[in-house]
Image (cartoon, helix red, strand yellow):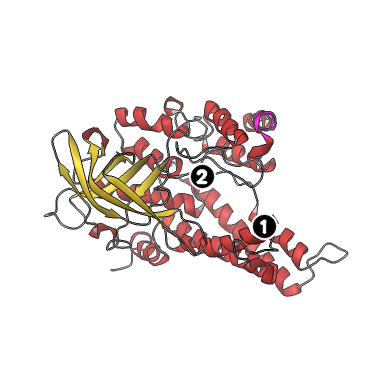
Amino acid sequence: MSELQEFRAEVAGWLQENCPVGARGPGQIAVGSSKIVLEPDVALWLERMAEKGWTAPTWPTEYGGGGLSPAEAKVLYEEMANIKARSPLMGMGTSMIGPTLLEYGTEEQKQRHVPKIARGEVQWCQGYSEPNAGSDLAALSTRAEDRGDHFVINGQKIWTSGAATADWMFILVRTDPDAPKHEGISFMLLTMDQPGVTTRPIRLISGSSPFCETFFDDAVAQKEDLVGELNKGWTVGKRLLQFERSGIGGLSGGARAADPSKTLVRVAKEYIGETDQGRIEDDALREDILNMNMTRAAFNLTAQRVNEENKSGIPGAATSIFKLVGAGLQRDTADLKRELMGFRGLGAHEEVGFTADELKATEEFLHLRTTTIYGGSNEVQANIIAKRVLGLPE
């Protein structure tokens, strides 16, 4: 038996023994917020996985991670999926700011922030987009003034996911208004629990309100929470976006409680029907599902190959390809799932007579359209691919 096989057996046994029933299948996942009460099994699952370092399995152990190799992390995710274990922790802490601090943060910043992220003790949100600076992010106008031992921030951000429950924000601010647009920008961290920060939820068509407007009126960021050099934050901010796009595009791995390929087959048999041989009755829909599942399998295998070939572990411009294709794949899968349900996949949130799965399908149909916008719209990704991957003239 190889070392990886031995590791798989060890992981499978540990997960079977330590993953609570209430942390398997669909349900609550911790995001680290001090303002959200966790279900008992969810809290226990987070505690046990954090103790192993498996909330961030590939991060260095000195910062609360598991120190696993990419191959070992893949085994962990596969074994979690086998027992339908949910991720113990999700959010911008592990997917975005954590990896960015590990690359750009000072040792003091790593020691102060990264272990708390790995333990699920803090939720982060992103202060990037503004009412007049979305896809053209470098046009941002929120300002931070140097006041000696701290910065004072004034301005507004929008589409700040999770801002209403977040404990900290990473933010791009303008620190030199006279510099060219892509310069004079700094990357900072600030606590959300202060008088100068106000959030206002934005209700979405899906019925949820994860996005917020965020207002800064003399908000304070400490000098030690400047990440990277003053006025050089655009470089840090772009790297964070690559980490974000890696997650959206499926390059960062991660546990999935449900396999979308199997879900489509299950839904089709339930709502369309199946033959005595177990085949989906509708030939056209069966072909649609086959094509979708083959595309997803090819995408996952390509992502696996790219991860294995990327020796540095640092995402590059090619992440835009996976974000572009992956976002479309998520959207199209939700579209097909809703189509398979027929009118049952069009239920409103409080409509009488629709099951929880049917209401969830409607929400996914509406929500997953946003994957083609957030993290950089499809048009932005196409421009990056043209310029930085294909080398086409501007």
Taking depth in this image into account, of 54 and 33 the one nearest to the observer is 33
Give coordinates of residue 16: x percent, y percent. 70, 32
Give whichever of 139, 61 is nearer the camera.
139
Which of 349 and 6 lies nearest the eye of the viewer? Answer: 349
Q: Amino acid at mark 1?
A: Asp
In the displayed orientation, state which residue is furthest to the right.
276
On residue 308, the disc is: 2
Where does the image place residue 272, in percent across and percent down from the top left? 76, 68
Q: Are marks 1 and 2 in contact (CB under 8 Å)?
A: no
Chain part drawn in magenta:
10-20
Q: Is residue 85 above or below residue 249?
A: above
Q: Position of residue 373 (x, y in %)?
A: 42, 62
Q: Nearer the viewer, mark 1 or mark 2?
A: 1
Q: In 3D space, how far apart are the residues under numbered discs 1 and 2 (Cα atoms)?
A: 36 Å
Question: Is residue 150 shown in magenta?
Answer: no
Side of 209 relative to 175 (left or right): right
Q: Secondary structure at mark 1?
A: helix
Magenta stretch, overall SS: helix
Query: Label 1: which residue?
Result: 357
Q: Please state which amino acid type lies under the numbered disc 2.
A: Glu
